[in-house]
Amino acid sequence: MRITVFTDGSAKGNPGKGGYGIVMRSDKGHQKEFSAGYRLTTNNRMELLSVIVALENLKQEGMDVTVYSDSKYVVDAVQQGWLYNWKRKGFEKVKNPDLWQRLLRILPKHKVNFVWIKGHAGHPENERCDRLAVAASDAPDLLVDAFYEQSRESMGLADE
């Protein structure tokens, strides 16, 4: 089975309230949408988390998956091999190591191809993901991005 995934992340303030949105389609015509909001995070974390959550929601291993993202940060990290260099170097001085390591755990379970698309350019699924991400960040009961908040605390940035 082939799966097409569209993802987007958003943050208001960067850091600030954020969210992600996902639209997933199978070649059999099934479609699902996912989204979640966080009280303090960054746009890059939400872009990356959207891809991770999409892949983690696949019910079987070995799927052919095409991920469409408007995040050069995410797409290039995988397609250009940066992610594997970061892993070899122990993620030293790399932002969001918790999420990159999580992505590395899920990527080998599928055949994943990443495609960059221009954001806010009228692509229907990307626009839908953006609306899902923004709505999630406006939800009343936002989740805690614990790794990010603890990292900020350890750097003395918690009260900014």
Image (spheres, helix red, strand yellow):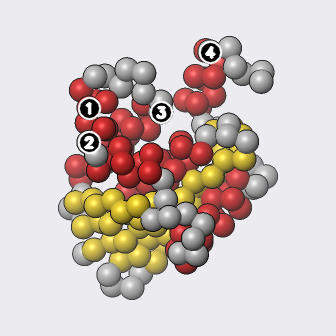
Residue 109 x %, y % = 24, 53
* Amino acid under disc 2: Gly
Seen in the picture, residue 120 relative to 124 is either above or below; the reply is: above
Q: Residue at x 60, y 66 (%)?
A: 120
Check contact, mark 2 vs mark 1: CB within 8 A.
yes
The disc placed on residue 155 is: 4
Residue 144 x %, y % = 64, 38
Of tags 1 and 4, which is closer to the observer?
1
Quadrant location of the N terminus in the rendered image: bottom left
SS at circle 2? loop
Quadrant of the rendered image containing residue 35: bottom right
| 121 vs 160, nearest the viewer | 121
Q: Is the residue marked by circle 1 packed among few (<14), some (14-19), or many (20+) residues within 10 Å?
A: few
The disc placed on residue 160 is: none
Of tags 2 and 3, which is closer to the observer?
2
Q: Is the residue marked by circle 2 packed among few (<14), some (14-19), or many (20+) residues within 10 Å?
A: few
* Amino acid under disc 3: Asn
Check contact, mark 1 vs mark 4: CB within 8 A.
no
SS at circle 4? loop
Of tags 2 and 4, which is closer to the observer?
2
First along the sequence among labels 3 and 1:
1
Residue 74 appears anywhere in the view? yes
| 42 vs 60, nearest the viewer | 42
Seen in the picture, residue 119 relative to 44 is either above or below; the reply is: below
Location of mark 2 (residue): 81
Q: Residue at x 31, y 22 (%)?
A: 90
First along the sequence among labels 2 and 3:
2
The disc placed on residue 85 is: 1
Check contact, mark 2 vs mark 4: CB within 8 A.
no
Q: Residue at x 63, y 39 (%)?
A: 41
Quadrant location of the C terminus in the rendered image: top right
Location of mark 3 (residue): 96
